[in-house]
Image (cartoon, grey):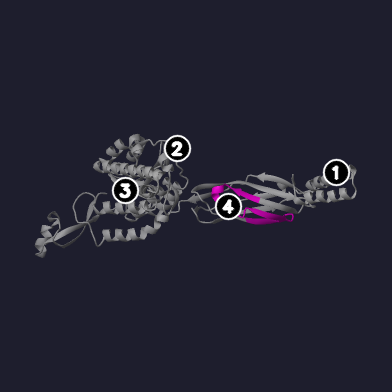
Amino acid sequence: MAVSGRAVWLVLVGLVLVVAWPGWAAFWIWLAVSVALVVLDAVLAPAPRTLLVRRPPLAAVRLGEPRGTELFVQNTGSKRVRGFLRDAWVPSAGATNTRHRLDLPPGERRRFEVTLTPTRRGDRLTDRVTLRTTGPLGLASRQSALTVPGRLRVLPPFASRKHLPSRLSRLRELDGRSAVQHRGQGTEFDSLRDYVDGDDVRSIDWRASARRHAVVVRTWRPERDRRVLLVVDTSRTSAARLAGDGHAVTVRLDAQIEAALLTAALASRAGDRVDLVAHDRRVRARVRGTSRNDLLPSLVEALAPLEPSLVEADWDAVATEVRTTTRQRALVVLLTALDTSVLDSGLLPVLEQLSTKHTVVLAAVDDPAVPALARDRSDAEAVYTAAAAETATAERDRTARLLARLGVEVVHADPDGLAPALADRYLALKAAGRL
């Protein structure tokens, strides 16, 4: 039972009567009358169990986009129901307009809507639906909390898709007018054209040159139907929160997901077969053998509920997963942190092993706050902080050079720049015939 503001005013009126007729008898009489009225009003209030509450399934929404959720309440009792309703969600669902006034005649149904603007990716769940029915005097209410299951799947925003048109334009140029001019496995013949200074003499087609009475060369285009395997590291390093000048705070895993989505979209449009594995000590998500049309929806659906796991990555298991997923030469893109601690945890021998058979790219997110800290020399404490930032930058660059000597391509950029930088590296490898 809940007491309303009217009950408080009823007691205050009694104080006036006590002042008019002093004495404890008047006080106790009025208090007994007030309690009796409140109890009677609570007894006469309709039972919340007479209300049938239903929530229809919710469609998925991208992070940051609003979505309306409906709640249907039907009065199955014989009394008119007046009161209040609260549809509670977890805070990260960003629910607004959660409180509504109830006024339901017997047998009727009402629709209530709550607007959700989620602030986190993944599954946002309902908390509970609280129903409060008031009595005919409005002095007291009966309250009940119901569990009405509801789930909103919040998909990655894929903000990096704005970079896709420009990269597709470069892909068309690479695949057509600017054909790659070199021999080797992983390319296919495109056309013949006249020889110009600077062309590789090994590309000259002597038979065609004899027929045309001019020197002509063969051109090749990057071969389609190559394999691209994206490996997203969901271990403890992916939980790092990154921020900097002009950047909102973001989790490293979210930046890795953006880069994976853009690369997958570009590679699928290039005719390559794309697979994805999210891994730490076990497989958290897998997309394999999906058609081009279903690839992006499958990736978004698989990556949406991913959360960082506060454990060390099992890199040997990752290598086994790569061998299981593809036995032919492929482009293996590992989205993780460019950190000496990661290499020391067992990644280095795995990279050496993978690079002997595959083209390996390590894509890492830089913390945009580090350059700002390195520039600050305002006081003694800032100088020490700047020195630490410079040391971290030097270690990162040294690690990148070490991986380059092992044949591993290294791409690192801030959270907003990683996706386009990785897409550019993919195009460069495509143009070089290294896929």
- Between circles 4 and 1, the one closer to the viewer is 1
Q: Residue 157: tell me if it is visible.
A: yes
The amino acid sitting under disc 2 is Leu
| Sooner in the amino-acid sequence: mark 4 or mark 2 | 4
Instruction: Categorize mark 3 by other alpha carbons within 10 Å: few (<14), some (14-19), many (20+).
Output: many
What whole-number distance in Å separates the C-alpha atoms at marks 1 and 2?
A: 60 Å
What whole-number distance in Å separates the C-alpha atoms at marks 2 and 3?
A: 24 Å
Q: Which residue is mark 4?
A: 95
Q: Residue at x 40, y 38 (%)?
A: 280
| Sooner in the amino-acid sequence: mark 3 or mark 1 | 1
* In the displayed structure image, the side of residue 387 where residue 405 appears, left or right: left
Examine the structure image and report whether residue 323 is included in the region drawn in magenta.
Answer: no
Examine the structure image and report whether residue 104 is included in the region drawn in magenta.
Answer: yes
Q: Residues at badges 4 and 2 in contact (C-beta under 8 Å)?
A: no
The amino acid sitting under disc 4 is Ala
What whole-number distance in Å separates the C-alpha atoms at marks 3 and 1?
A: 78 Å
Q: Which residue is mark 1?
A: 32
Q: Which residue is mark 3?
A: 411
* In the displayed structure image, the side of residue 341 where residue 114 appears, left or right: right
Q: Position of residue 268 (x, y in %)?
A: 35, 53
Instruction: Identify the magenta region.
Output: 86-112
- Between circles 1 and 2, the one closer to the viewer is 1
| Sooner in the amino-acid sequence: mark 2 or mark 3 | 2
Q: Which residue is mark 2?
A: 310
| Sooner in the amino-acid sequence: mark 4 or mark 3 | 4
Q: Which residue is at the far front?
A: 379
Q: Residue at x 11, y 58 (%)?
A: 207
Q: Nearer the viewer, residue 226 or 368?
A: 368
Q: Position of residue 271 (x, y in %)?
A: 32, 54
Residue 177, image quadrant: bottom left
* In the displayed structure image, the side of residue 138 where residue 203 appears, left or right: left
Q: Secondary structure at mark 2?
A: loop
